[in-house]
Image: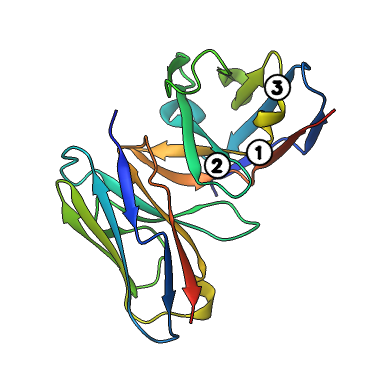
Amino acid sequence: EVQLVQSGTEVKKPGESLKISCQGSGYRFTSYWIGWVRHMPGKGLEWMGIIYPDDSDTTYNPSFEGQVTISADKSISTAYLQWSSLKASDTAMYYCARIQTSDFDYWGQGTLVTVSS
Amino acid sequence: EIVMTQSPAILSVSPGARATLSCRASQSLSNNLAWYQHKAGQAPRLLIYGASTRATGIPARFSGSGSGTEFTLTISSLQSEDIAVYYCQQRGGTFGQGTKLEIK
C-alpha cells in the first residue's frame, strides 16, 4: 500500500527555522517525483515545487523560489520542506504528494504549521 | 505561466441533481488536466486525470471531459458526501482557485 506520512503539527515564532518531512512507503521512492502543496486558511491549493528523490532534481513555483527549500534523502525515503526564517504568512497546512506522470495520485495527511509571536 | 480559471466559485446543487464545474486554461494543455476533491479536514484526493480518466476507486458518477483549454467535471447525481472544494490542475503544476460545491 502506497503511503506518505508527514511529520506532526508545528507551532513556531516568526524568524525561526523549520524543516517538515514526508516519508514514502509501499513503492519505489526514487522512481516518482514528490510535490509540495500549500493550503492557507480560507484559500485554495498552491503548488510549491517538486523534487525527484533519486537525484534531487528540483523545480520551484516562482512564487516560492527563495522562500523555501525542498530536499530529499533517498536512503530513508523522505522528502523535506524547510524555511530558514518563518513569517506569520507561512501559517498553513502543507501537503506532500506522489506524482504519477503529472498527477498527484497519493497524498500525505498534511502538516499544520502555525507561525505566531 | 499557465493560469487556471475555475467557475463558478460556489455551486449550490440539490441532492440527486447534476453538478457541472468548469475549468479554463490560459494556454492549451491537450488533455493534461487533473481534478481533485478536497474535503474539510482531509487531504485532497485525485478524481480525474488525463482530463477524462477516473482514478482508482472513484465512483462512476464523476466524469471529466474537455481538451485544449476548456474542461468540465460533472457529478451526475449529487450525494451528500460530495460536498467539498474541487480543483483542477494543469500538468502537475498550477491549480485553479477551486469551486466550492454546496448542497441546496
Q: Residue A97's x, y, as percent?
A: 51, 39
Q: Return the residue at label 3.
A: A19
Label 2 marks which chain's residue? A
Asked if residue B55 lies left or right of residue A69, the reply is left
The disc placed on residue A26 is 2
Q: Residue at x 59, y 43 (%)?
A: A108
Label 1 marks which chain's residue? A
Residue type at the position of mark 1: Ala
Question: In this view of the protein, which residue sits in the foreground, B24 or B57?
Answer: B24
Q: Residue at x 58, y 35 (%)?
A: A24
Please tell me which of labels 2 and 1 falls first in the chain: 2
- Total number of numbered discs in the rendering: 3
The secondary element bearing badge 3 is classed as strand
Residue neighbourhood size for the residue with mark 2, other residues' Cα within 10 Å, grouped as few (<14), some (14–19), many (≥20): few
Label 3 marks which chain's residue? A
Please tell me which of labels 2 and 3 falls first in the chain: 3
Q: Residue B12's x, y, as percent?
A: 44, 75
Above or below, A93 against A14 in this view is below
Asked if residue B30 lies left or right of residue B39, the reply is left
Above or below, A55 against B37 in this view is above
Q: Residue B88's x, y, as percent?
A: 36, 50
The secondary element bearing badge 2 is classed as loop
Asked if residue B64 lies left or right of residue A43, the reply is left
Q: Return the residue at label 1.
A: A92
Q: Residue B53's x, y, as percent?
A: 27, 58
Residue type at the position of mark 3: Lys
The secondary element bearing badge 1 is classed as strand
